[in-house]
Image: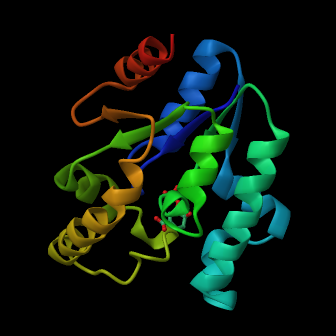
Amino acid sequence: MNIVLIGYMGSGKSLVGRCLSETIGSEYLDLDDYIEAEEKKTIKNIFEEKGEVYFRKKEHFYLKKVLGAFENTVISLGGGTPCFSGNIEIINKLAEGRSIYLQTGVDELVERLFGEKNKRPLIAHLDTKEALQDFIRKHLFERSFYYNQAAYKIITDKKALNDIVAEIQAILK
Ligand code: S3P
C-alpha cells in the first residue's frame, strides 16, 4: 500500500517522504519530480511556458497515473495537488486511508521558503518576508479545507525529521 504525503510548499513532504521510505524500506516517489521527468521540463518552465491551468491538468493526470501504477511507495505530492480537480477524493480513495497532512505554521514556512522561493512559481514574485507571510497566511487558509481531508495530520513545527518519521510509523501501525 502507498503512503501519500500532502502539505503546503516547504512543509517537508520530500524530506520526510525520502526519510520515511528509507526507514520502512519502501520505494519513494515525488510527484513534482515525476512530472518534470515525464514532461522533460522543470515545473518552473511549465508554469512560464504553458501557465498554471495546463500544469494543474498534467498534475491531475500524473497523480492518477502514479496512484494506480505504484505499490508500497511513499509518494510526496506538490503543495497544490490536493486542492484541484477533485484530487483529494482520488488521493483518499486510492491511498486507502494512508494520506497524511504535514501541517507547518506560517512563520516556519516563511523562514523555510524565503531563501528558495525562486524555484516556486507561485511565490517567486514576493520580494519581502512580509509579503511572503501575507500570501502564505491567506493561501494556507484557503488550502486547509483540502489538506484537512487527509486521513491523518502531523504537526511538524519544531520537530526533528526522525521524530516526524517515527510519528508517521506509529499512526500507520
Ligand atoms: C505548488 C507546489 C510545488 C509545485 C508547484 C505548485 C503549489 O510543489 O507543485 O510549484 O501549488 O503549492 P512543492 O510543494 O513540492 O513545493
Image quadrant assignment for residue 125: bottom left
Closer-to-camera residue (75/16): 75
Image coordinates of residue 129 in percent, x first then y, are: 19, 70
- The answer to whether any part of residue 10 appears in the image is no
Q: What residue is at 49 percent from the left and 32 percent from the top?
A: 16
- The answer to whether any part of residue 137 appears in the image is yes
Closer-to-camera residue (12/115): 12
Q: Quadrant of the N terminus?
A: top right
Image coordinates of residue 4 in percent, x first then y, are: 58, 38
Vertical placement of residue 45 versus 96, above or below: below
Vertical placement of residue 52 versus 158, above or below: below
Left or right, residue 15 beside residue 54: left
Q: What residue is at 69 percent from the left and 88 percent from the top?
A: 50
Q: What residue is at 25 percent from the left and 59 percent from the top?
A: 110
Image coordinates of residue 141 in percent, x first then y, are: 25, 64
Closer-to-camera residue (26/82): 82
Left or right, residue 18 beside residue 166: right
Image quadrant assignment for residue 133: bottom left
